[in-house]
Amino acid sequence: MSRDREIILDDETSAVLDAIAAAPDDPQAAFDAANLTRQEIEAGLQFLPPAQAAMVAEYLAALDNTQSMSPTVSTAGTLRDGFVYALRDLYDSEKQLTKALGKFAKAASSGELIAAFASHLEKTHGQIERLEQVFEMLGERVRGKHSEGIAGIIDEGKSVMEEDFDHATMDACLIAAGQRAEHYQIAAYGTLIAWSRALGLPEAAELLEETLEEEKAADTTLSKLADSGIIDAAAEMWQDPPDDSEEAEVSTKAKRAGQAAAAKKSARR
Ligand SMILES: [Fe+2]
């Protein structure tokens, strides 16, 4: 919409005006097309020139009339609201994981496993930044909502750490905990990618896809580590457990090797 545009409008306000121009006789369709909630439209009124603000207010009043005449018109949240809700959950889950991955790495003995947790921790910081970009694309405040799902998975991982397991069994359990967390996020990213496409947000879908690939790669790495000796070592400990001093020595050596591998990796960056 170009008429009376005396000031440079932000994208959101511009979207409202364009939508109203496209469907002047149908305010509900206009707001749906603008992909904005009523609260967002009302908040944007103050930034409009007076004539245009009056026009939008008129449409809001028309919408109220339409709704009061038709009890079947829903005022419930839309898929966009569901998207933001899921985005906040995922944002919080990534934040929770940044703390948990460090703890998983500390509890692990295998050098490769320690390095895998450390590497994914670094990737997680980038994933948080991508989610922040998606919030910005939507014009939404960057905010998390406590993710009960990932909190439960992390708690399970932490309670395993309190168990008196041999080092190989502990590594196998930590891999299982890490993979449960990855699978939670793989499901969440998959959903958000599909929804962002449906909502006409291809740039958001692209960013989320980048992260989804990282989550899948982390899951594959953990599977390979489990299959490349950790599960066998755990089974061996079960069949032929060493005495306490022998196990402590093996565990200390493995931890040192892991810390050295992680330090080497970060020095290369
Ligand atoms: Fe992640």
Image (tube, grey):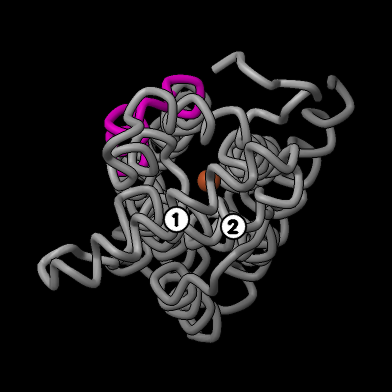
Specify which label sits upstream in the sequence, 1 or 2.
2
On whether residue 20 falls in the magenta region, the answer is no
Q: In which image quadrant can residue 248 be found?
A: bottom right
Disc 1 to disc 2, how far (Cα)? 9 Å
Closer-to-camera residue (195/122): 195
* Left or right of 17, for residue 140: right
Q: Residue at x 68, y 35 (%)?
A: 126
- Per the picture, the main secondary structure of the magenta-coloured stretch is helix
For label 1, the SS is helix
Q: Start and end of the magenta stretch?
A: 191-205
| x then y, percent, for residue 210 | 50, 24
Closer-to-camera residue (251/128): 128
| Amino acid bearing label 2 | Glu
Q: Residue at x 65, y 56 (%)?
A: 43
Confirm or deny contact between disc 1 and disc 2 (CB under 8 A): yes
Q: Which residue is mark 2?
A: 42
